[in-house]
Image (spheres, rainbow, N blue to C red):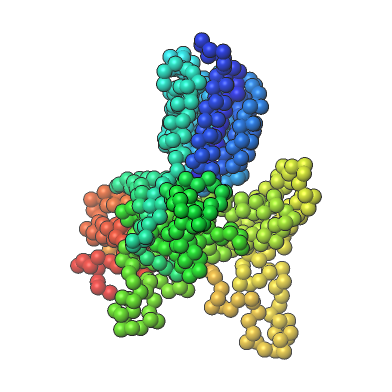
């Protein structure tokens, strides 16, 4: 999990500590160095960025794994004027979104002396004007990405300024999601108390995950990086909380083609831990293979199940299905970032047994030989609920813009390629055309103008050392996106509208053969907006589909067939998009509708709504092939 350290460099940080020769800023630097020293030993793979702020903010160091570089820059920061926490948080938002996007969780550590600032720039003024904000300039918290905010106050507990600022900083943490906290040194303010404060924070937040990987009688001690976070999600009627067990058990293997690329809660690098014998050997020193001293055995000569598993998964092109906790699963596989180097990775799914719809319920998987034997030896029968041609994989070249984050991720991918021009020229235009075609298919023409404006802004923000071709390509792309011919193909099955002509000319060009279709797609292939599809790019599309279901619900039993037809259509779309939460949401809406029915409502209305809500919460309703059918009452025919 990336870490952003935000250090207050206002004049109040220059106040000397009572009875000491050093200042609060010296204590802050010492505390940050304590965290960096801990990360250098226990979490070497973490990315850390350093931001300094007063009334303005400065990115002292972008995200890096070079902790010594951050330490050196930390010693060079200068003090400025007044404290403005809002400005610093705006800077954190910008830094993280540009580097990691809106889906990567980050740790934000705010190091300050506890004073909230004064005047219009103070934290008190910022929090008191939350409801009066202009939508174009919102308060930066909650962050635009999943975040855990920790405020480290370099102040004694009886400091008058801290007593004023403490409730304000606590409210700031609550606004961010409440996962972090405000932390104070214990006892008098000193180097030792501050070091203890930061050391405890590092141990509780950045400790490595040590566990055991088990498969039958084979075991291996492993480290997961980054550390997997506990799962917590509040539904309508329950709060789901899970923590990963110390023992990760492999209970089966599947072909990579069968698994595809399902939606993941998080991904982690799996590293083996050196054995007790290997720990006594200094890294990099070779030992004599003929030595009789067993304590000097080189790690490379000690058998490791983790290494064996990695090689087997890579050669056989399979994944290992793992049980992480009760009803919580993941897959382990070999992933290569280049042709020569590969890593053992763990993908963690969301808790539940039906998180990969095309595999069915994971707790019911078994040996393939048993399945073949149960089908009289017929190996042609697919063992999974969906055929390979029907399953939906997130690695396919499609766009999913149900939520704003999906569109943002696609645009940020284009911008990442743009900043690496001309090396990434082909990738840049490939992604740009993919997004452009999707926007035209959805009728989202405004996106093209938005992309053009983004490219023009990127040109003005290019650093001095940027390649000249970068500005040329961005300007060219922005210019073409605004041309009429870049958006003429708004009806794909008709082709380019500016090239349409009289049908008689087309027939004559084909020697009078009227059987040849004049358009790019045959009538059976074209996609019409009147077909039974869903378009949920914007919130209004989803709302309209739900309201249509509710309109039929209020006219039950006359509209029973229409009600279930629309409900199954929306349910299948939600499963195809991986939008499982929608099913629980619909169930809650139906239950609420039951309580709002007027006294003169037909009795079958409440019966059918309660039945639909109950079925939506059943595991088998997550199968796209399943159809929810009406509850058979005396008001509804069996057909």
- From the image, which quarter does the C terminus lie in? bottom left
Q: Is residue 80 above or below residue 355?
A: above
- The answer to whether residue 373 shows anywhere in this view is yes
Count of numbered tags? 0
At a point 71% along the width and 77% down the height, the residue shown is 502
Is 283 situated left or right of 306 in this image? right
Is 383 situated left or right of 528 in this image? left
* Camera-nearest residue between 163 and 444: 163
At a point 59% along the width and 17% down the height, the residue shown is 14
Residue 298 x/y as whole percent: 50, 53
Residue 51 x/y as whole percent: 60, 32
* Camera-nearest residue between 523 and 366: 366
Residue 326 x/y as whole percent: 31, 53
Residue 339 x/y as whole percent: 61, 63
Q: Is residue 66 above or below residue 154?
A: below
At a point 46% along the width and 22% down the height, the residue shown is 193
Is 592 situated left or right of 193 in this image? left
- The answer to whether residue 270 shows anywhere in this view is no
Instruction: State which quadrant residue 443 falls in.
Output: bottom right
* Camera-nearest residue between 373 and 471: 373
At a point 50% along the width and 47% down the height, the residue shown is 281
State the residue lying farthest toward the right: 468
Q: Is residue 585 above or below residue 82?
A: below
* Camera-nearest residue between 381 and 606: 381
């Amino acid at each position: 999990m990336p870490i952003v350290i935000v250090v207050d460099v206002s004049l109040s940080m220059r106040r000397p500590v009572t009875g000491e020769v050093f200042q609060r800023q010296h204590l802050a630097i010492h505390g940050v160095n304590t965290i960096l020293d801990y990360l250098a030993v226990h979490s070497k793979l973490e990315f850390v960025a350093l931001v300094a702020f007063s009334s303005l903010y400065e990115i002292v160091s972008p995200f890096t794994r070079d902790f010594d570089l951050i330490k050196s820059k930390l010693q060079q920061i200068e003090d400025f004027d007044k404290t403005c926490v809002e400005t610093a948080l705006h800077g954190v938002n910008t830094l993280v979104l540009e580097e990691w996007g809106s889906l990567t969780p980050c740790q934000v550590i705010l190091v300050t002396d506890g004073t909230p600032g004064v005047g219009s720039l103070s934290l008190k003024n910022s929090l008191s004007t939350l409801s009066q904000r202009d939508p174009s300039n919102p308060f930066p918290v909650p962050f635009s990405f999943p975040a855990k905010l920790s405020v480290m106050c370099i102040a004694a507990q009886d400091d008058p300024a801290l007593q004023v600022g403490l409730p304000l900083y606590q409210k700031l943490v609550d606004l961010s999601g409440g996962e972090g906290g405000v932390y104070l040194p214990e006892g008098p303010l000193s180097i030792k108390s501050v070091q203890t404060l930061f050391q405890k924070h590092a141990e509780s937040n950045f400790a490595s995950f040590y566990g055991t990987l088990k498969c039958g009688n084979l075991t291996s001690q492993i480290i997961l990086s980054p550390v997997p976070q506990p799962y917590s999600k509040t539904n309508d009627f329950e709060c789901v909380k899970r923590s990963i067990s110390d023992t990760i058990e492999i209970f089966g293997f599947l072909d990579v083609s069968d698994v595809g690329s399902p939606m993941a809660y998080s991904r982690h690098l799996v590293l083996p831990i050196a054995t007790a014998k290997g720990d006594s050997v200094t890294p990099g020193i070779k030992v004599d293979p003929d030595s009789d001293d067993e304590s000097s055995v080189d790690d490379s000569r000690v058998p490791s199940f983790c290494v064996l598993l990695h090689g087997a998964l890579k050669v056989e092109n399979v994944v290992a299905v793992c049980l992480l906790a009760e009803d919580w699963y993941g897959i382990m596989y070999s992933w290569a970032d280049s042709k020569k180097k590969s890593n053992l990775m763990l993908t963690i799914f969301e808790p539940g047994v039906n998180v990969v719809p095309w595999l069915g319920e994971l707790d019911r998987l078994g040996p393939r030989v048993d399945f073949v034997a149960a089908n009289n030896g017929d190996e042609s029968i697919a063992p999974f609920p969906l055929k390979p041609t029907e399953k939906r994989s997130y690695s396919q070249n499609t766009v999913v813009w149900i939520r704003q984050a999906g569109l943002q991720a696609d645009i940020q991918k284009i911008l990442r390629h743009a900043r690496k021009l001309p090396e990434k020229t082909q990738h840049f235009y490939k992604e740009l055309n993919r997004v452009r075609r999707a926007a035209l298919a959805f009728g989202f023409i405004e996106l093209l103008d938005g992309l053009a404006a983004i490219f023009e802004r990127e040109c003005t923000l290019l650093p001095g050392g940027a390649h000249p071709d970068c500005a040329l390509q961005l300007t060219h792309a922005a210019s073409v996106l605004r041309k009429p011919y870049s958006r003429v193909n708004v009806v794909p099955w008709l082709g380019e509208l500016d090239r349409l002509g009289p049908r008689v000319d087309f027939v004559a060009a084909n020697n009078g053969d009227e059987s040849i279709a004049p358009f790019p797609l045959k009538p059976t292939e074209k996609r019409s907006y009147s077909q039974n599809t869903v378009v949920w790019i914007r919130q209004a599309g989803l709302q309209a589909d739900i309201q249509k279901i509710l309109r039929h619900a209020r006219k039950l039993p006359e509209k029973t067939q229409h009600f279930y037809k629309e409900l199954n259509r929306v349910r299948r779309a939600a499963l195809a998009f991986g939008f499982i939460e929608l099913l629980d949401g619909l169930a809650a809406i139906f239950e609420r509708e039951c309580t709002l029915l007027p006294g003169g409502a037909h009795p079958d209305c409440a019966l059918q709504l309660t039945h639909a809500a109950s079925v939506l919460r059943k595991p088998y309703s997550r199968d796209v092939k399943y159809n929810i059918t009406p509850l058979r009452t005396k008001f509804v025919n069996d057909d």
